[in-house]
Structures are given as structure tokens and as C-alpha cells.
């Protein structure tokens, strides 16, 4: 059985200016694990507000992530939506890698 990706957190979030009012763009650091291995990388994502329903989330990887991360991408989308809903999707200070 293959190891699955587990998210620990998304931090070091910075908002990137967007010319479109209903789309917010961000860069952040994703921290997690695959089995017993620690995984950490930066990625970009955007939230597009829609008239009804949940915001659309698009993810762009800066570096190619392990395939377990791509397979577990829905976890990342769900966490981003949850953070946005609770107001936790805001700039966080750089803490080093």
C-alpha cells in the first residue's frame, strides 16, 4: 500500500496583487508528511468567488511535488476553503524553511 499525503499546515501566506476583484491570489508554504517523511514546499493558489456555492480554488505548484501530494490535492483545496471561511487566510510572517 502506498503512503498517503497528510497536511500539517499552510503558512507563510502572502497575497499577490490581482487585477480581478473577485479573484484573490496567494503564495504559501505547505507542510505535511508522506508516511514518515516530512514534506515542505511553496505553491501558489487562487480563490475565485462565485455568485453561489464555494469559491473555486486553483493550485499552481512552483516545484514539482511528489505524486502523493498531487493525488491528495483535494485535501489542500478543502483546507484552503476552510481557512478562507474562518478568516485564517491572511498574511503570515516568514519563519524560514
Image (spheres, grey):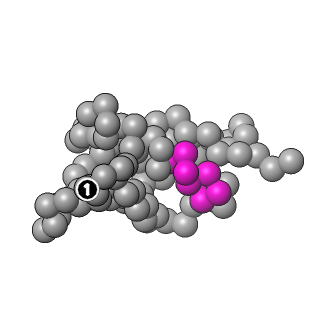
Can residue 95 be seen by looking at this rendering? no
Secondary structure of the residue carrying numbered label 1:
loop
Q: Residue furthest front?
A: 52
Residue 51 pos. (x, y %): 25, 56
Residue 76 pos. (x, y %): 50, 48
Q: Residues within 10 Å of mark 1 (few under 14, many from 20)?
A: few
In this rendering, the count of numbered labels is 1
Q: Taking 6 as reference, is 51 above or below it?
A: below
Residue at 30 percent of width and 45 percent of height: 13
Q: Residue furthest right?
A: 1
State which quadrant residue 21 falls in: bottom left
Residue at 71 percent of width and 45 percent of height: 4
Can residue 56 be seen by looking at this rendering? yes
Residue at 52 percent of width and 35 percent of height: 8
In the image, 74 versus 13, the foreground residue is: 74
With 1 as the anchor, is 37 left or right in this view? left
In the image, 51 versus 27, the foreground residue is: 51
- Give the magenta-colored segment's residue range: 69-76
Q: Is residue 73 magenta?
A: yes
**Secondary structure of the magenta portion, mostly?**
helix
With 72 as the anchor, is 17 left or right in this view? left
Q: Is residue 21 magenta?
A: no
Residue at 16 percent of width and 66 percent of height: 20
In the image, 96 versus 33, the foreground residue is: 33
Residue 88 pos. (x, y %): 29, 34
Residue 56 pos. (x, y %): 37, 57
For the C terminus, the image quarter is: top left
With 33 as the anchor, is 57 left or right in this view? left
In the image, 19 versus 5, the foreground residue is: 19
Q: What residue sits right under mark 1 in the picture?
A: 51
Amino acid at each position: 500500500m502506498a503512503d498517503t499525503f497528510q497536511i500539517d499546515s499552510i503558512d507563510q501566506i502572502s497575497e499577490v496583487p490581482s487585477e480581478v476583484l473577485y479573484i484573490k491570489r496567494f503564495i504559501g508554504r505547505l507542510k505535511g508528511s508522506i508516511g514518515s517523511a516530512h514534506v515542505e514546499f511553496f505553491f501558489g493558489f487562487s480563490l475565485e468567488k462565485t455568485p453561489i456555492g464555494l469559491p473555486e480554488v486553483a493550485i499552481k505548484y512552483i516545484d514539482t511535488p511528489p505524486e502523493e501530494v498531487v493525488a491528495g490535492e483535494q485535501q489542500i483545496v478543502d483546507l484552503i476553503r476552510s481557512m478562507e471561511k474562518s478568516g485564517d487566510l491572511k498574511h503570515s510572517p516568514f519563519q524560514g524553511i
